[in-house]
Image (tube, grey):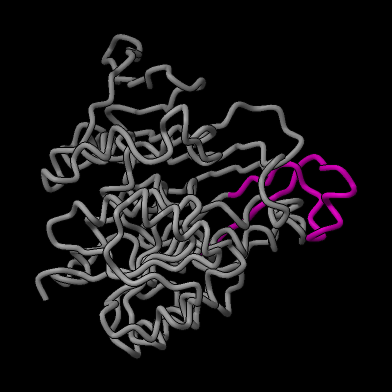
Amino acid sequence: MSKLKVGLVGLGFGAEFIPIYQAHPNAEVAAICQRNQSNMDTLVEQFGIQGNCYTSYEDMLADPTVDAVHINTPIADHARHTLMALEAGKHVACTVPMATSVEDCERIVQASKDRGLVYMMMETVVYSREFLFVKELYERGDLGKIQFLQASHQQDMNGWPSYWEGMPPMHYATHCVGPVLGLERKLAKAVSCVGSGRIRDNLAQVYGSPFAVESCHIQLQDSDVAAQIHRSLFDTARQYRESFNVYGSLKSYEWPLIEDEQPVIHTLGKPEPEIPSRVEVPDYAHLLPEAIRHFTGRGVYDSDSNQHLSFTQGGGHGGSHPHLVHQFIRAVLEGHNAYPNAVESANISCVGILAHESALAGGKLMAMPEFTLKP
């Protein structure tokens, strides 16, 4: 197989990935699925789609020309749509999270293993230019020994689709779990989480989750390092922020407090005090095939005339989308162990699921399921 033939479903935000697959030298958009025919026609015209067009997901999965499916449907559909695709013999790339229950995460891991198919959760932060910069510092030895990891994801979800209303903050925690596990490619072995504050009663009743903020400590497997993450979705005043702080024995990196500011590097001074300095984060398009490099700087939804909430609030996801596509294609065509694979995706997702259970239980320590600990 020289080209991966991909079918895409969930084409609101998911339309962002169509031109990346079209431009990639080792991929082809074989099909798209859009329930609304009028929206389908618009997509076909906008992107010049040559592949098959379906209003039924089942029909797209039955298409023998489709090798893999990229899923961007609503959160509650992720597990069902993923399992359907795996059962149909298709490799899967799925937006976050993998699922909303431990049981569904285990089903996906087992189905991927049983059928020998690639599953990759498309976690944006671990391919953002900021994360790739920190990862380069770490791999070069500039940070020294990692001593502590910290991440946050704070966002006001008012105005988003109704299924977000009242969602437990940790049920969508992958953007802060991913980087603290991904830097050293570790797995979480246990979590303890506390809830803080209270959201409006009408929101709290939807999922039975009262907390405005959930804050979680993560114990890493085979490591003396711990991580702390926190997450908020409603009734907490904060500009959108996905942050990642890394504290090392030689240097530490801190994400900017305000969007469009530069991050800070702290360098250990001996015997002088620590020295802080602002640093400009470079782009990492050079890691990509030339044909898709320009997508790190622009996309479908970053123009004034064509906006999506994930871009206006999320800052364009740090140029991560072409990196995600490239890694998925490599995983299927080359057998590359792209991050995060099925087990790692389950581990990341289950951190959030069990963290919320811990918060409801007053901070109880929760061990990660065994199936998430064997990569």
Q: Position of residue 108 (x, y in %)?
A: 46, 79
The quadrant the C terminus occupies is bottom left
For the residue pair 265 and 26, the one nearer the viewer reads as 26
For the residue pair 88 and 189, the one nearer the viewer reads as 88
Asked if residue 292 is among those painted magenta in the image, a careful observer would answer no
Q: Quadrant of residue 24?
A: bottom left
Q: Is residue 70 above or below residue 153?
A: below
Count of marks placed on residues: 0
The quadrant the N terminus occupies is bottom left
Q: Quadrant of residue 142?
A: top left
Q: Is residue 187 above or below residue 226?
A: below
Q: Position of residue 190 (x, y in %)?
A: 53, 62
> Which contiguous range is marked in magenta?
190-216
Q: Is residue 363 left or right of residue 245?
A: right
For the residue pair 345 and 206, the one nearer the viewer reads as 206
Q: Is residue 79 left or right of residue 265?
A: right
Q: Quadrant of residue 138?
A: top left
Asked if residue 210 is among those painted magenta in the image, a careful observer would answer yes
For the residue pair 240 and 182, the one nearer the viewer reads as 240
Q: Is residue 224 left or right of residue 185?
A: right
Going 77% across and 59% down the picture, which residue do you hit?
A: 360
Q: Is residue 205 above or below residue 213?
A: below
Q: Position of residue 114 (x, y in %)?
A: 35, 90
- Toward the right, the furthest residue is 201
Q: Is residue 108 left or right of residue 280?
A: right
Going 35% across and 52% down the picture, which residue do you hit?
A: 17
Going 42% across and 17% down the picture, which residue do you hit?
A: 261
- Toward the top, the furthest residue is 272
Going 44% across and 68% down the picture, which residue do you hit?
A: 33
